[in-house]
Image (cartoon, helix red, strand yellow):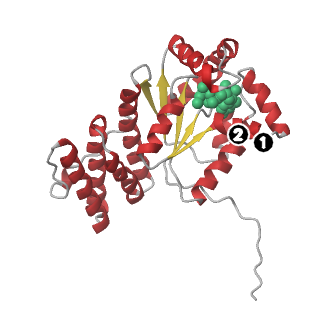
């Protein structure tokens, strides 16, 4: 038999666009991520859920995490990053398609710097904005059934203080650093927040794909959404079509042309709207960055 010598390798790059999903406690990050996963090709990584899963293992590390969460503090960056990296690489190995949504992280400048030193930088940020009053009300309501040790009045106050002092500066820093931070009004009804989120995610995916010259991958991901189209998502489908057209324009393949035609057919079926797909592909304009 052949003798195979293995030696340690550099970690393979994740090679998937990453988006941070940020916002105060109770702003609806987890809810919106779950909806995105249900409708689109993307994967959701909740830092809080990963930390709670570590607590559930009963490890020593879990005990430390549990104390931090109960007091509304931020767990040491290395711990959260290890959990996130592991989850993301496992998902990638299991065939998960991007974009990857990192929910509830980075929560501090220290989190951000430690993460960006060893993992792919984010392509865009979804930032859910809501008043402290509304978020507190939601958390107290959730606390009735969530079983979470931090959904009580005392811990909620501490979580908001941490958010103001440590997490908001991350958003402000990313905004100043020309990252695409998209502020979303999270006080609207869930489906309206979702419609706004879809639009932004599709634009951001498109830009990320352009940058990575991986139009084919993203086009496929976006077009899959057509199969789940709902009236509220009409704008999203329209955007998706623009992406497909552009993909076809840049690097037309039969597969892409077929996918674009399929999306167009779906739009016609759901919304009774006629769209020309491949005949006018040269009219597609690049959306201005970060608009
Ligand atoms: N947490 C942390 N680092 C993270 C994410 C979460 O330390 O990157 C801790 C922190 O104590 C936070 C708690 O986990 O208050 C719950 O986070 P989660 O994101 O689940 O809460 P949400 O903001 O969604 O209500
Ligand atoms: Mg959450």
> In x, y percent, where is residue 50?
67, 40
> In x, y percent, where is residue 109?
65, 29
Mark 2 touches mark 1? (CB < 8 Å): yes
Residue for point 38% across, 38% down: 198
Task: Quarter of the image for the C terminus: give it.
Answer: top left
Q: Residues within 10 Å of mark 2 (few under 14, many from 20)?
A: few
Side of 220 relative to 284 (left or right):
right
Residue for badge 2: 53
Asked whether 2 or 117 is in front, the reply is 2
> In x, y percent, where is residue 42?
48, 48
Q: CA distance from mark 2 to mark 1?
A: 7 Å
Q: Secondary structure at mark 2?
A: helix
Q: Is residue 107 visible from the viewing direction of this image?
A: no
Q: Is residue 274 visible from the viewing direction of this image?
A: yes
Q: Secondary structure at mark 1?
A: loop
The picture quadrant for ligand 2 comes to: top right
Residue that sits furthest to the front in the current view: 145
Asked whether 174 or 66 is in front, the reply is 66
Task: Quarter of the image for the N terminus: give it.
Answer: bottom right
Residue that sits furthest to the bottom in the current view: 1
Residue for point 31% across, 40% down: 236
> In x, y percent, where is residue 99?
48, 48
Total marks drawn? 2
Residue for point 63% across, 60% down: 12
Q: Quarter of the image holding residue 289?
A: top left
User: As displayed, is residue 229 above or below residue 151?
Assistant: below
Residue for badge 1: 57
Side of 153 relative to 281 (left or right):
right
């Amino acid at each position: 038999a052949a003798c195979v010598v293995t030696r340690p390798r550099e970690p393979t790059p994740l090679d998937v666009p990453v988006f941070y999903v940020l916002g105060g406690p109770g702003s609806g990050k987890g809810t919106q991520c779950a909806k995105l996963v249900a409708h689109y090709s993307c994967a959701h990584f909740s830092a809080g859920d990963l930390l709670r899963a570590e607590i559930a293992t009963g490890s020593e590390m879990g005990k430390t995490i549990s104390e931090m969460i109960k007091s509304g503090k931020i767990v040491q960056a290395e711990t959260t990053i290890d959990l996130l990296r592991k989850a993301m690489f496992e998902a990638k190995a299991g065939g998960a398609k991007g974009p990857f949504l990192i929910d509830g992280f980075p929560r501090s400048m220290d989190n951000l710097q430690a993460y960006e030193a060893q993992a792919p930088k984010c392509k865009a940020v979804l930032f859910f904005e809501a008043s402290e009053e509304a978020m507190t009300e939601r958390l107290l309501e959730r606390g009735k059934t969530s079983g979470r040790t931090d959904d009580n009045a005392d811990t909620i106050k501490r979580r908001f203080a941490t958010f103001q002092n440590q997490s908001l500066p991350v958003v402000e820093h990313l905004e100043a650093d020309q990252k695409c931070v998209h502020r979303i009004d999270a006080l609207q009804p869930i489906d309206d927040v979702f419609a706004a989120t879809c639009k932004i995610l599709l634009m951001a995916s498109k830009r990320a794909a352009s940058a990575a010259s991986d139009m084919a991958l993203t086009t496929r991901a976006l077009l899959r959404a057509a199969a789940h189209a709902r009236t509220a998502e009409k704008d999203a489908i329209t955007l998706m079509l623009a992406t497909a057209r552009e993909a076809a324009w840049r690097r037309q393949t039969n597969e892409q042309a077929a996918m674009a035609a399929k999306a167009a057919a779906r739009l016609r079926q759901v919304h009774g709207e006629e769209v020309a797909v491949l005949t006018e592909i040269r009219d597609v304009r690049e959306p201005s960055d970060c608009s």
